[in-house]
Amino acid sequence: MAPGLSGPEQAGTARDPSGSGHPSPRTALVTGASSGIGAAIARRIAAEPGWRVVVSGRDQQRLEEIAHLTSSVPVRADLATSAGAEHLVTGALDAVGHIDVLVVSAGVGWAGSLPSMPEAAVDEVLTVNLTAAAHLVRLVLPGMLAAGRGQIVLVGSTAGTYGVRQEVVYSAAKAGIEALADSLRYELRDTGVRVLHVVPAAVDTPFFERRGTPYTRGVPRPLPPERVAEALWDALTHGRDEVFVPRWLGLPRRLRGMAPGLFRRLASRFG
């Protein structure tokens, strides 16, 4: 049994993050899987015996490549559109019948001052990073609740936990992911559906190239996406609610709670 599980969740085991207790195959839907963190997560889950993965992204060619490498089912969807989440969940359910684990890792960024940020960029960052996440969870939850089991995994960012200058809207969207995870956890108590919030620092992916501004901070140094995927899987199999990658980045949260004034002075200088 995975540590810390109780009630309906006791059906899960340390190697069964879905909590299903049912024979294979178990299914995972991973968004943002055409590259970066999402692709690494898809590879990590697909490497486990008895798992079937649905991968989703906007780039059809890269999506087909990762699907081929992981023997996954590709479902292309543009989560920047109003119909993207529904299209994705419908396609996934048509392909595999049920979803045991939903991993929401799709994301886009934008760097620069808030007054210089185009209106379309504000809408895209909020839609892909937050609005689509809420819709995906809303659409997947009924099946999980009916089954009495499941796992929602929301990939946030330290930008959402602490705030980052020149990334105001992205930070706000990822802060919304943290609140979404916490609120869902309270709402889903004793239902058998668990919620995991994964909080990585900068990760060495095409994310920064696509946003048009390179990553320039010396600390923390960008992590390989495989490290995030491994931390996510470890947190799933041990029933954790939240994991920072690297773990030491959870320490500033304690400082903020104990000495908010000092935290903000330091964040203003270094953040």
Image: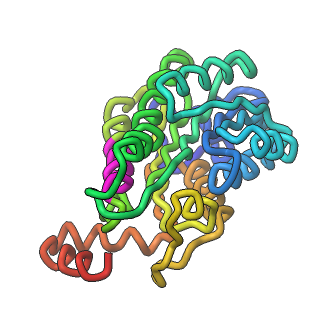
Quadrant showing the C terminus: bottom left
Residue 19 in sight in this render? no
Magenta span: predominant SS is: helix
User: Colour scheme of this structure image?
Assistant: rainbow
> Residue at image x 62%, y 44%?
32
Residue farthest to the left, as pictured: 261
Where is residue 92 drawn, in percent x and y? 68, 24
> Residue at image x 47%, y 40%?
128
Q: Of 102 and 14, which appears nearest the observer? A: 102
Q: Quadrant of residue 55?
A: top right
Where is residue 255 drawn, in percent x and y? 24, 74
Query: What range is drawn magenta here?
Result: 168-179
Q: Specify whether residue 252 is painted magenta.
A: no
Q: Of 267 and 142, which appears nearest the observer? A: 267
Q: Of 8 and 49, which appears nearest the observer? A: 49
Where is residue 27 drawn, in percent x and y? 70, 31
